[in-house]
């Protein structure tokens, strides 16, 4: 008996996203509904087909009122991006247990026009001037540098690869190519991290439609199967920068994810890595076993993550660093479009992509494997 | 001149930490069952989930586990000090504090540097623990 028997039981059958930028004329609910309309259309369904709703960063009652979605199943989730992965699995389980047949998963964010601040508020460490998730990751990366010999320049290889992808994405907020020296010349926000190590806060909406694999067979789009999912939390250092880069939790996820999906790491054609800050990409790659711990910096050199150059094309949309910080949700959309084929500009297509892996290194460590040939 | 940086906002658990600091004493809760310290202050020991803890005085000695230099203006009260360093200190008793470094002199901030606590009076109500290179 496998420890997870939901392999290929659920599919993503519709995706939608808005433009990303500054949209003071609307709000998170409006952006979420715009994305959902696009996803409904993409899936070839109607709003009447939706009998389950999972929301992220949205006021659930107002959203359901405005979207006019009266269903037997609705779940709001907290604003943290880690809930992108959690929401996806929540849908897989709800579909498997018959709580819903067609689930709309919706993310809406008006953080840029509402001047959402990540840092500067009250906090236990504020009297010492320490604030913001970026500073916490900077603290972690300094520790990583001291322990393993990684450098700030290693992070430039992450940022430039993702920006290269964004140059082929008309919906990316930042499309101008950057070089390693450009990264190194960008201003420090929190040394050792620079501006180009930070995600891009923007307004936007993202939606997915998920249903059972049975139903997905007859639908408009080529189904994308959720083949595997694994998660391990570690909140033991929630008040501090994690001194272990969540490595033990990520390692546990690494031991489960391929067995659950029924394929190996070698079968993966590309990656979607949660890139709130560039060091997280190294922590995820190390923790999930793409390289040894401490070797993430060397691993990403020479274009390893760059499409057309390296073995592991990663965040082919540009990711949070160059497309927009849609907290994991838009990374999954990109994965779905890649796996359908022909839905991104040809130069951005991962050739013959059959399986992609999502990697999440936060106090919630998780991974998802999506496939199109299950 | 009035103090412009953010002040602590003690709650019922962290109150004794700031009260001790006001008396130039670094304190943390210690789990009486395991002997281990924990921080930030909490209602129960995370090791036993029980209220079997007591406030103990710490040596105030430790080493720099990591550090950053803040270049972004998040707090108006820190604006004049940008860029300023923030250090993560691993105390000898095993708990960590996020703090600032003073009296660095000609030394370069580095991971592993031994440090010891110093108390800086902010207001009549609050004194903050910061660190200097250990002598």
Image: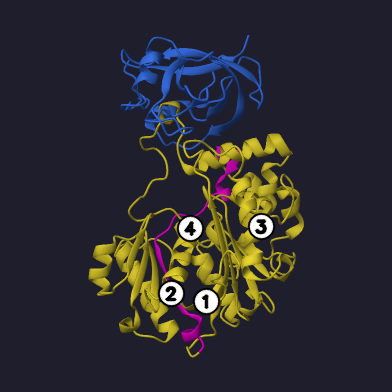
Q: Disc 2: which chain?
A: A
Query: Which numbered disc, 4 or 2, marks the residue that appears first in the sequence?
Result: 2
Query: Which numbered disc, 2 or 1, marks the residue that appears first in the sequence?
Result: 1
Give the residue number, with chain letter if any, for mark 4. A325
The Cα atoms of the two marked residues, 3 and 1, are separated by: 21 Å
Q: Are marks 2 and 1 in contact (CB under 8 Å)?
A: yes
Of all residues, the one furthest to the front in this rendering is: A1
Q: Nearer the viewer, mark 4 or mark 2?
A: 2
The Cα atoms of the two marked residues, 2 and 3, are separated by: 25 Å
* Chain letter, colour yellow in render: A
The Cα atoms of the two marked residues, 2 and 1, are separated by: 8 Å
Circle 3 Cα neighbour tier, 10 Å, few/some/many (<14 / 14–19 / ≥20) = few
Tell me the tag on residue A9: 1
Q: Disc 1: which chain?
A: A
Give the residue number, with chain letter if any, for mark 2. A95
Q: Disc 4: which chain?
A: A
Do tags 2 and 1 sit on the same chain? yes
Do tags 1 and 4 sit on the same chain? yes
* Chain letter, colour blue in render: B
The correct choice, above or below, for A367 with respect to B65 in the image is below
Q: Nearer the viewer, mark 1 or mark 4?
A: 1
Element type where label 4 sits in the image: loop
Q: Are marks 2 and 3 in contact (CB under 8 Å)?
A: no
A231 left or right, relative to A314: left
Query: Which numbered disc, 2 or 3, marks the residue that appears first in the sequence?
Result: 2
Q: Which residues make up the magenta segment?
A: A190-217
């Amino acid at each position: 008996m496998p420890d997870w028997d939901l392999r290929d039981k659920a599919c993503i059958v519709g995706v939608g996203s808005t433009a990303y930028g500054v949209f003071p004329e609307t709000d998170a609910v409006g952006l979420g509904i715009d994305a959902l309309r696009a996803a409904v259309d993409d899936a070839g369904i109607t709003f009447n087909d939706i009998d389950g709703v999972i929301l992220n960063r949205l006021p659930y009652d107002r959203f359901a009122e405005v979207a006019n979605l009266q269903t037997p199943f609705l779940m709001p989730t907290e604003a943290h991006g880690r809930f992108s992965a959690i929401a996806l699995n929540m849908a897989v389980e709800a579909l498997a247990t018959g709580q819903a047949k067609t689930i709309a998963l919706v993310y809406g964010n008006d953080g840029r026009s509402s001047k959402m601040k990540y840092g500067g508020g009250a906090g236990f460490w504020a009297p010492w001037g320490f604030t913001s998730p970026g500073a916490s990751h900077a603290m972690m990366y300094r520790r990583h540098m001291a322990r393993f010999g990684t450098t700030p320049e290693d992070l430039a290889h992450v940022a430039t690869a993702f920006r290269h992808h964004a140059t082929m994405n008309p919906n990316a907020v930042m499309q101008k190519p950057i070089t390693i020296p450009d990264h190194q010349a960008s201003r420090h926000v929190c040394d050792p991290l620079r501006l180009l190590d930070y995600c891009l806060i923007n307004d936007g909406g993202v939606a997915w439609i998920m249903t059972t694999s049975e139903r997905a067979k007859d639908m408009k789009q080529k189904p994308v199967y959720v083949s595997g999912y694994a998660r391990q939390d570690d909140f033991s250092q929630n008040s501090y920068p994690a001194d272990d880069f969540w490595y033990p939790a990520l390692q546990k996820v690494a031991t489960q994810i391929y067995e659950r999906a029924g394929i190996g790491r070698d079968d993966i054609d590309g990656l979607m890595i949660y890139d709130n800050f560039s060091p997280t990409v190294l922590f995820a790659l190390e923790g999930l076993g793409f390289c040894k711990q401490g070797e993430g910096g060397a691993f990403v050199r020479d274009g390893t993550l760059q499409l057309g150059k390296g073995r592991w094309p990663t965040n082919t949309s540009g990711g949070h660093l160059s497309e927009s910080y849609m907290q994991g949700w838009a990374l999954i959309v990109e994965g779905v479009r890649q796996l359908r084929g022909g839905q991104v500009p040809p130069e951005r297509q991962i050739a013959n992509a059959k399986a992609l892996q999502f990697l999440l290194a936060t106090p919630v460590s998780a991974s998802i494997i999506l496939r199109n040939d299950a | 001149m009035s103090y412009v940086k953010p002040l602590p906002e003690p709650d019922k658990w962290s109150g004794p930490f700031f009260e001790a600091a006001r008396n130039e004493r670094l304190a943390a809760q210690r789990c009486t069952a395991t002997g281990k310290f924990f921080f930030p202050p909490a209602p129960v020991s995370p090791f036993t989930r029980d209220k079997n803890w007591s406030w103990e005085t710490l040596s105030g000695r430790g080493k720099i586990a990591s550090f950053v230099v803040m270049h972004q203006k998040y707090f108006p009260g820190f604006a004049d000090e940008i860029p300023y360093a923030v250090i993560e200190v691993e105390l000898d008793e095993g708990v960590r504090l996020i703090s600032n470094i003073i009296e660095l002199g000609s030394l370069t901030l580095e991971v592993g540097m031994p440090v010891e606590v110093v108390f800086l009076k902010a207001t009549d109500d609050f004194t903050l623990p910061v660190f200097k290179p250990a002598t």
